[in-house]
Image: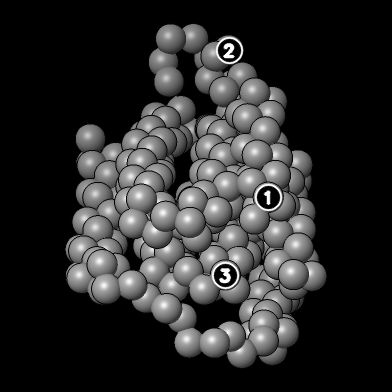
Amino acid sequence: MFLEYLVLAVALIFGVLAVLVKDNAVAALSLAFSAATVAGYYALAGLVVASFLVFVVYIGSVILMVMVTASMYGGFFDYPRRYKAAVAVLAVVAALLLWALIPQAPPPQVGQELQPNFDLLALIAALLVSSLVVAIEVAKRA
Amino acid sequence: MIAAIAVGLVLIAVGLYGLAASRNMVRLLIAVEVVVVGALAALAPVLSTAPSVGLWALVLLISMAAGEVAIIGAVIYRTYAAAKTTDLEELRSGGDRP
């Protein structure tokens, strides 16, 4: 219970940071942490399909495009190399801490009606990623 | 689970504040995504009690998020290519051209 509250508090803090900080790239990074924490909350509650959907589809396509956009127009590529390395190290340490702190949950119960949806989720993921790529290409060439 | 709903609603409120207060198109995009993350958090109890309904609601929410990011991202790229800025105040003061 305490761990769930902690995860939700972290999601809330990073969500608020995403709106309040001045830098676009840092805001996008905070948003990514917030979304990842919500996906971790799903995993903690044993919602495997939903966690997969948020981690792979949402963070892998939507949040990634937000981060790329914010980095392009937020000056992240002009930052010193030390800053970029520090951000990368911080992300890795946070991921490792989460991995170590989350207790070994019992095997998730995936209902029979959810099993065939994995194919559908993979199809949706491919569709969303391709739509984002098409949007960028159309915007570049129009 | 009540805590998840509360956190989700607070995140939605924070995202709406960001939408109202931001003057940069990238910040607007990030604020919209904060609203989506809040909706994701508030959806967790539904996924626990009615997994099938919650799953399809989640698929719908993520599809909508991807669509809006595609559209807003394309608008940002075109605007920056045309006006070399994403700041709405600068765009507004620059006349009719985006």
Closest to the camera, between mark 1 and mark 2, is 1
**In the rendered structure, the residue with mark 2 lies on which chain?**
B
Residue drawn 42% across the image and 30% down it: B79
Q: How many marks?
A: 3
Apparent side of residue A130 relative to residue A12 in the rendered image (left or right): left
Q: Are marks 3 and 2 in contact (CB under 8 Å)?
A: no
Q: Residues within 10 Å of mark 2 (few under 14, many from 20)?
A: few
The amino acid type found where label 3 is placed reads Ala
Disc number placed over residue A108 in the picture, else none: none
Identify the residue under disc 3.
Answer: A45
Spot occupied by residue A79 in the image (x, y as percentages of width and height) = 68, 62
Apparent side of residue A52 relative to residue A33 in the rendered image (left or right): left
The amino acid type found where label 2 is placed reads Ser
Judge whether A72 appears above or below B17 on screen. Answer: below
Identify the residue under disc 2.
Answer: B93
Spot occupied by residue B88 in the image (x, y as percentages of width and height) = 57, 23
Q: Nearer the viewer, residue B27 or B48?
A: B48
Tell me, yes or no, whether dots 3 and 2 are on the same chain: no
Residue B11: tell me if it is visible. no
How far is the residue under mark 1 from the one under mark 2?
46 Å
The quarter of the rendered structure image containing the N terminus of chain B is bottom right
Residue drawn 27% across the image and 44% down it: A135
The quarter of the rendered structure image containing the C terminus of chain B is top left
**In the rendered structure, the residue with mark 3 lies on which chain?**
A
Spot occupied by residue A111 in the image (x, y as percentages of width and height) = 33, 72
Identify the residue under disc 1.
Answer: B2
